[in-house]
Amino acid sequence: MLSSDKNKLVDKVNTAFANIGKSNGTKMPPSTNNADSYAYDLWVSHQLVSLANKRKELAEKACIKAGIMLDKEKDPRPEGTKEVLFSGDNVAISLNVSGAATRINTDKLLAYLDTHLMEIGAPPDLLPDAVKFASSKSRPAHVFSTYLLTND
């Protein structure tokens, strides 16, 4: 495909996406509340994210089944891997494996330290004080939900 054809296709997909909730029978019903349009746009966005995630999941499964993409759970690649998995006439699929995050099981760490600190005669309140000193709470998750209201 020519670059100009690619750009036109991307523009058509982007335009169709941008029009969802604004035209094509998906425009917000009339409202007397000026803020309703913002909430409606958020609802449409939630719908699109949900649909896009499901479509992506199904497309990935289909690509795995077709043998043009690997199953990252069953056949993981090592960190730093960069490879083209599929190159067709119009679309390519590439893989870039980032570095894995290190996670610490704090319960196991504390149990290990507690045992070893006792062996060297550390004060019993050292570990709880250290945990209190090094701990902070993250911002709790804020999950916004949207739903359409009906009057029937």
Image (spheres, rainbow, N blue to C red):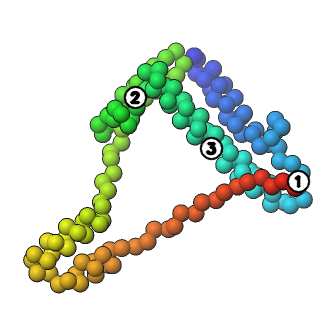
**Which residue carries the number 3 mark?**
50
**Which residue carries the number 2 mark?**
70
**Which residue carries the number 1 mark?**
152
Structural crowding at the residue carrying mark 2, measured as other residues with C-alpha within 10 Å and reported as few (<14), some (14–19) or many (≥20): some
Looking at the image, which is closer to me, 4 or 75? Answer: 75
Nearest-to-viewer mark from 1 and 2: 1
Give the quadrant of residue 2.
top right
Does residue 138 appear left or right of residue 110 in this picture? right
Looking at the image, which is closer to me, 127 or 108? Answer: 108
Position above or below: 80 against 103: above
Q: Earlier in the sequence, mark 1 or mark 2?
A: 2
Looking at the image, which is closer to me, 8 or 86? Answer: 86
Give the quadrant of residue 87.
top left
Does residue 5 appear left or right of residue 75 in this picture? right
User: Which residue is located at x 59 percent, y 38 percent?
Assistant: 54
Structural crowding at the residue carrying mark 3, measured as other residues with C-alpha within 10 Å and reported as few (<14), some (14–19) or many (≥20): few
Q: Secondary structure at mark 3?
A: helix
Residue lying farthest to the left in this orientation: 120
